[in-house]
Amino acid sequence: MRIVNALLFGSLSWTLLSACSGSEAPEGQLGKVSQGLALPPATGAYASGVYRNLFEEWNPSLTDADVQAKLDQLWNHYFGLGGTNSFYFAGDPNANGATAYVLDTGNSDVRTEGMSYGMMIAVQLDKRAEFDALWNWAKTYMQHNDGGTWDGYFAWHASTRGRPLADGPASDGEEYFATALFFAAHRWGNGAGIYDYEAEANRILNTMLHKQDMNGGIVGGVTNMFDAAAKQVVFVPYYDSATHTDPSYHLPAFYELWGRWAQGYSGQQAADRQFWLAAAATSRQFFGAATHPTTGLNPDYAEFNGTPKANASGDRQGTHADFRFDAWRTAVNWSVDYAWWAQSSSEVTLTNRLQDFFFTQGMSTYGNQYTLSGTALSTDHSLGLVASNGAASLASSGAHGNDFVAALWNAAPATGQYRYYDGILHLLGTLHASGHFRVWDAAPDPCAPLVTCSSGCVDVQADAANCGSCGNACGSGATCTAGQCVVSCASGLQACSGVCVDVQTNASNCGSCGNACPSGVCASGTCAGGAGVFQMSGAVVVMEAEHFATQVSHGSSALWSVTSDAQASGGKAIDLLPNVGATWSTNVETTSPRVDFLVNFTQTGSFNFYIRSTGATRNDDGSWGGVDDVHIKQAFAPNSTGTLTWGFRSVTVSSPGVHTVSLWGYEDGVRIDKVVITQGAAPTGLGPAESPRQ
């Protein structure tokens, strides 16, 4: 079996954690650095089979026995059943055997973070009894198994008696559960029932990636745990919390393994494995975007493009736009990714930058919270951050990597009320830096990450005989591109649904496949013959939504369609169909289906932009508006179900003349009746009469 050293931290901060102060042992014989660390190898450990022990690199006088003694000490300290410093406690046995839980001693509850970390620690240290007890408790009390909208996800925290305290999951818990279960299957073999570790791991992967497929769309606000377009893990798969991410939840080293091991949902093994590999590549790019260019610090929460998320649900003070408790672990995630796979040298640069910053803050005094630019927000010096910074030395080529390893080795174990968070990161960090955190690999798959078909190892993304899946052969004259059979068309034509068309003139595929022109006229790739130019009068312009001039699909399968509605002004409105739970929250201008109106503005300045809209559910009523292909940065969501309701945002028009007014979809299924742009009174009822057109 391939053995790989790793530490991948993820965390949950739905409740702002109390400040965690750690302590360090007095500097003794091993307190001084004996020599520097080796440079990170150019070949990842997964391929080379070489796994580093940072403690012995730092101080060659340390022996394997010394390091093992350190690990034994920490295991007994933190997982000693009934110990005053422990956070591991026995639960009531059930039909599946013993149960146990990891207690968040600071909040007196049980969290998927701690349970999944505990399972990972247990499988690394060959503690199968403890692993099974933790999994039994999590499976029994935290995983939803009722066939409802949350089915397959885990409630992120529960009481010590097993009562869920919230329905929704925390994404890092699922990620760690799945990987720990895979490791258990490969190390110990699968058992029966809930101890068929591999089957349980695949169920979690399928739920994370295909929850909307399982539910038939976004039901009750529940979404996939990975955004399909962004290819990123979401903060929480629920309503607005699914539209941004948490940098410490990005675990590309895990995703690479899933890209080799995932069984796949409903026969989609090839596509699912490709998604996990793409998610790994995306996270590597994301790390650079999410970190400060000087300090290397990252925020707790971020948009998919890496910018800090200051107004997340539950974060009204905007504190999670700073480097706080969740953010501690992100550097370890990118460092272990480099140590395992060595695919992005930028991860070494990021570690050097971060360690340089903390070194200047004082190795024994740096705080545990900062603004991204480096202003201290706390003077507490926390063991959990010491452990994270020490383990991050796996990707350090700078001058201070050895100092952070020394600090980790000399750190005293956590005690007291807040020992859980500091302590569990301490033990994980020590495992990682010692070379004892291991990937227990599956039996070698000679084709991975390709797919095994009857003809041998196949790239189903490009093989015309096995396009998308084994045995799916493309027809004569077609090629396989990105897992889809594509007809080979003559120059100037494009294949749409297997037919070669000229998208410059085809009214059913105008500009791109599937972009149908309501007017039936396509000229130069743009729908023409629409409503003409609306004329503003008295700083007011009014447009019936069905009288749009052009439509652009941006390659989406969703399109705006004119529909009859007795509630609508003029009896008609437009719907964004099909309603399959799609959303567009980032890169709106280039990804979301759009309709345009041409408006002659005779007045300039600030206007109120009103939209009369609705949706069948609150998951279907969102849209964006804007002028000159720039969307207003707040979506229109009237929170109405079945009743057309006015909502407004502000927009500025800086020059007179003809401008393009656009509507984009935020959620498919939205219905829009009318648009009013005014510097006057708000519209009511059906709104004012439509403006004249020329």
Image: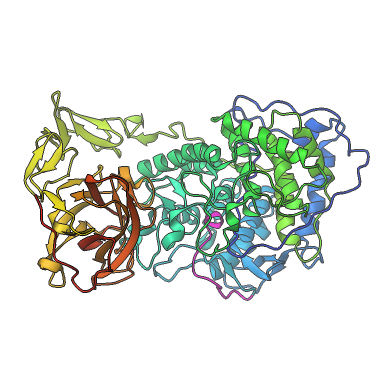
Expressed as whole percent of the image width and height from the top left, the position of residue 368 reads 72, 51
Q: Quadrant of the N terminus?
A: top right
Q: On screen, 259 above or below 642?
A: above
The foreground one among 649 and 428 is: 649
Asked whether residue 122 appears in the rendered view, the answer is yes
Task: Specify start and end residues of the magenta stretch as a single range.
Answer: 161-174
Q: Is residue 166 magenta?
A: yes
Q: Main secondary structure of the magenta part?
A: loop
Q: How is the image coloured?
A: rainbow
How many numbered circles does the render carry? 0
What residue appears at the point 14 percent right and 26 percent down from the top-left corner? 492
What residue appears at the point 61 percent right and 51 percent down from the top-left corner? 322
The foreground one among 568 and 139 is: 568
Asked whether residue 237 appears in the rendered view, the answer is no
- Image check: 607 left or right of 82? left
Expressed as whole percent of the image width and height from the top left, the position of residue 590 reads 31, 42
The foreground one among 106 and 119 is: 106
Residue 114 lies in what quarter of the image?
A: bottom right
- Image check: 517 left or right of 406? left
Expressed as whole percent of the image width and height from the top left, the position of residue 338 reads 60, 33
